[in-house]
Image: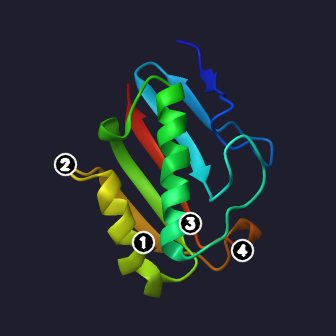
Amino acid sequence: MQKQVVVSEKVPKPIGPYSPATILGDLVFVAGQGPLKPGTTELARGTIEEETERVLENIKAILEAAGSSMDKVLKTTVFMADLNDFGRMNGVYAKYFPKDPPARSTVQVARLPLDIQVEIECIAHR
């Protein structure tokens, strides 16, 4: 099996030496996504709800480019600048995983890149 790199104009451009996602066999590994505008490296700053929605829309686009979808996400890791915003982030998150949500870990980090409020990575089946 050989690793495949996922690229699409519908997803944000990486801001460093990494791929938005890689595929190996039937698994898709999506790199941590911040609230970047699709096809750019420009931030879409806003409330925690707006940033969470942008992040999840980016993940959705990456998964679709990889031949997968949100309902095939097996595991997510959510990195937050402030866990006091957990409930507000979780309200948006729940809309993207309404049935049989994936396993999830959520952690507060000292500082996220570019001072964003939330970053999410995931592993999905395709």
Name the N-terminal-most of marks 4 and 1: 1
Horizontal side, residue 26 vs residue 10: left or right: left
Identity of the amino acid at label 4?
Answer: Asp
Identity of the amino acid at label 2?
Answer: Asp
Q: How far apart are the two marked residues, 4 and 1, measured between alpha carbons?
A: 16 Å
Judging by the rendered image, the residue that carries numbered circle 3 is 51
Q: How far apart are the two marked residues, 4 and 3, measured between alpha carbons?
A: 12 Å
Identity of the amino acid at label 1?
Answer: Met
Point out residue 117 in the picture as x, y percentages from the top left corner. 60, 73
Q: Is residue 101 visible?
A: yes
Judging by the rendered image, the residue that carries numbered circle 2 is 100
Frontmost of labels 3 and 2 is: 3
Point out residue 37 in the picture as x, y percentages from the top left corner. 68, 51
Label 4 with label 1: CB-CB less than 8 Å: no
Q: What crowding class fits label 3: few (fewer than 14 Cα within 10 Å), some (14-19), or many (20 or more)? A: many
Q: Residue at x 64, y 25 (%)?
A: 5
Judging by the rendered image, the residue that carries numbered circle 1 is 89
Identity of the amino acid at label 3?
Answer: Glu
Dot 4 lies on which element? helix
Dot 2 lies on which element? loop
Judging by the rendered image, the residue that carries numbered circle 4 is 115
Label 3 with label 2: CB-CB less than 8 Å: no
Q: How far apart are the two marked residues, 3 and 2, measured between alpha carbons?
A: 23 Å
Point out residue 49 in the picture as x, y percentages from the top left corner. 48, 71
Point out residue 45 in the picture as x, y percentages from the top left corner. 67, 69
Dot 3 lies on which element? helix
Name the N-terminal-most of marks 3 and 1: 3
Position of 43 relative to 30 (above/below): below
